[in-house]
Amino acid sequence: MRVFSGVQPTGNIHIGNYLGALRQFVDLQEGNECIYCIVDMHAITTPKDPAQLRSDTLDVAALYLAIGLDPARSIVFAQSDVPGHAELAWTLMCCAYTGELSRMTQFKEKSRGHESAPAGLFTYPILMAADILLYDSELVPVGSDQKQHIELCRDIAIRVNNRLGDVFVVPEGRFLKEGARIMSLDDPAAKMSKSAENPLSRISLLDDEAKIRKSIMRATTDSEGSVRFDPENKPGISNLLNIYSAFSCLPVPEIEKKYEGAGYGAFKSELASVAAGALAPIKERYTEIRHSARLAAALREGAERARAISGRTMARVKESFGLGLGAGGG
Ligand code: ATP
Ligand code: LTN
């Protein structure tokens, strides 16, 4: 299958991003044709310092390799290095409706309280649809917060196909059971986020063991004292159980049994060890890769391969829409 996904270079990549999305990227390399992008054009929907953006883009690229993406197997590149993304986004913008974009919860959340918002924040899901459709992607591994955007992408693809014939492959989202939505450690009602003010609300992939331990030991729980999965009444403990299960590959009931009669302290302390143990090799590989020639070469070659695939799709799209007169104007 052709697999595509992207992560924004906005710093603080955390275990929510990893357990919801990135870890699937690695698993899917086996037997599929995978394309993984760093979506820097999505990142500028809110103003970014240029030097910081470039550095954050390289950080995500290095993390991609550090978690186990192999540039010999997967295509890894920065979105803005392939012009087809912006080109297809415009075409799709003419096939989407302001009404459907207004219903996107991410836009509503990010623009709440502001009289006006950047137009790019509003059209963000269309650029995401372009990312996916540009590569005839069949499968899109993401966290469950992206469900609505994937649905919109499918709707647009089906709409165009109904009007113009089989222009696009209609993709499916791929969501994991454990990890699809990791919640904030200090407020289990909110999703773990890169931008939350309190650094103890998240575990970043590059955190050291002391910080991981501190965040988990301070995580919000309840006063019942039993390690039991009950998201409605015990959202804090249930979130920690989810994280434990995702990192250890043990099913939740088994973890509940393991900590029967034990207090939250023992459970949290062992979870900190499990998480730190899983993240340590990623951090080590990241440090080796971040400033290496191998990273630069992987991104250059990835962009080249992506341009070749996307060029073929754009030629088909332009032909279907009646755009252009051929290279050089014919
Ligand atoms: P954040 O909200 O943390 O700032 P994001 O969702 O805006 O991050 P990305 O970095 O592009 O932006 O997300 C990368 C991937 O991580 C996406 O597939 C997204 O669904 C997933 N993801 C983000 N947060 C979580 C979470 N708390 N739990 C599970 N998956 C998540
Ligand atoms: N919108 C996503 C990031 C993203 C993406 C994509 C994910 C941009 N383009 C294409 C999958 C496929 C987010 O905010 N997490």
Image (cartoon, helix red, strand yellow):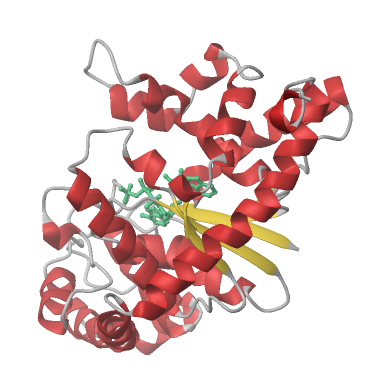
Left or right: where 88 falls relative to 272: right
Residue at image coords 59%, 79%: 72
Left or right: where 102 falls relative to 241: right
Classify the position of the N terminus by image quarter: bottom right
Left or right: where 98 falls relative to 12: right
Left or right: where 37 falls relative to 34: left
Residue 142: percent from left, percent from top: 52, 54
Residue 307 seen in this snapshot: yes
Q: Report the front residue among 51 and 230.
A: 51
Q: Report the front residue among 62 and 6.
A: 62
Residue 231 against residue 44 in the figure, above or below: below
Residue 142 seen in this snapshot: no
Residue at image coords 55%, 42%: 147
Residue 46 against residue 234 in the figure, above or below: above
Q: Report the front residue among 211 and 219.
A: 211
Residue 298: percent from left, percent from top: 47, 72
**Which quadrant would residue 201 be assigned to in this image?**
bottom left
Residue 301 against residue 266 in the figure, above or below: above
Residue 109: percent from left, percent from top: 33, 29
Residue 142 against residue 208 in the figure, above or below: above
Classify the position of the C terminus by image quarter: top right
| Residue furthest right in the image | 165
Residue at image coords 46%, 61%: 20
Residue at image coords 53%, 47%: 82
**Which quadrant would residue 228 be assigned to in this image?**
bottom left
In this rendering, the count of numbered labels is 0
